[in-house]
Amino acid sequence: MSLWMILPVSLPVFIITGIWVVYAMALYNQHVCPVNNWVYNESCVEPLPLQRGPVLCCTLDNIPLISKCGTLPPESCFFSLICSTGSFMVMLIGLLRYAHVIEKHQNCILNTAGLSTGWLCAAGLIMVGNFQHIPFFSYLHASLLNETTLTCVQTLRCHSGSPLC
C-alpha cells in the first residue's frame, strides 16, 4: 500500500477541520456571531467586538459565512494558509490522477480536461485565500472554477464506456 493513497482522503479532512478552526477563531475574537444566534437586528448600539455578555446583538454583517470568518486578522492568516495548502494538495492529487490514468490506459482528452479543471480549481482556491478583500475572485471561483466542474469531469473520465478515452 502506497502512502500516496492518504493524500486524497486527507484533503477534505484538512480543509473541513481548517474551516471550523477559522470559524472558532472568528467567534472567539467576536468578529462573527455564533451559528445558534438566528435573530439578527437591523442595528445595534455597540459594535460586536465591544459587546460583552452571553447575549450578543448581531446584525446581518456578523453572519458567520466563511467569507466573513476569514476576513479579519488573525483568522485571515490561518484561512489563507488553509486555502494555499489545500490548493497545493488539489494540484498534487490532480497530477497524480493524470499520471495514473496515463500509466493504466492511454492519454485522452478527458484526462487532460481533468488535469486542467483541477489546476483551475486550485488556482481559484489560492486566489480566494490570498485576495480576501477582493470579492471578484470569490465570485469567479464560485461560478466558474468550482469543484463541481472537477467532479463532473472526473465522473465522465471514470465512466468505462466513454468513447473519448
Image (tube, rainbow, N blue to C red):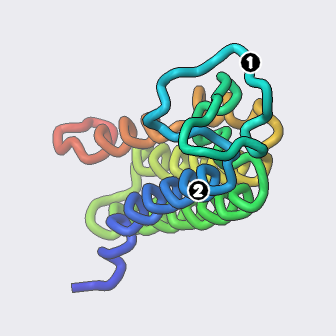
Percent position of residue 32, x then y: 64, 41
Percent position of residue 131, x then y: 79, 47
Percent position of residue 93, x then y: 45, 64
Quadrant of the rendered image containing residue 65: top right
Quarter of the picture containing the N terminus is bottom left
Quarter of the picture containing the C terminus is top left
Q: Nearer the viewer, residue 81 or 28?
A: 28
Identified at 66% across, 32% down, the residue is: 62
Given contact means CB atoms under 8 Å apart, are the residues at marks 2 and 1 in contact?
Answer: no
Q: Is residue 85 above or below residue 57?
A: below
Residue 140 visible in the shown view: no
Quadrant of the rendered image containing residue 91: bottom right
Identified at 49% across, 64% down, the residue is: 95
Q: For the residue marked with disc 1, what is the amino acid? A: Ser
Identified at 48% across, 55% down, the residue is: 20
Q: Which mark is residue 22?
A: 2
* Label 1 packing within 10 angstroms: few (<14), some (14-19), many (20+): few
Identified at 53% across, 60% down, the residue is: 21
Q: Nearer the viewer, residue 50 or 115?
A: 50
- Left/right of residue 39 with respect to residue 75 in the rendered view: left
Q: Give the distance between the C-alpha atoms of the residues marked 2 and 1, in whole angstroms.
A: 26 Å
- Left/right of residue 100 with respect to residue 94 in the rendered view: left
Quadrant of the rendered image containing residue 134: top right
Secondary structure type for disc 1: loop
Q: Nearer the viewer, residue 121 or 36?
A: 36
In the picture as drawn, the residue positioned furthest to the left comes out as: 161
Q: Which mark is residue 43?
A: 1
Residue 109 visible in the shown view: yes
- Left/right of residue 91 with respect to residue 141 in the rendered view: left
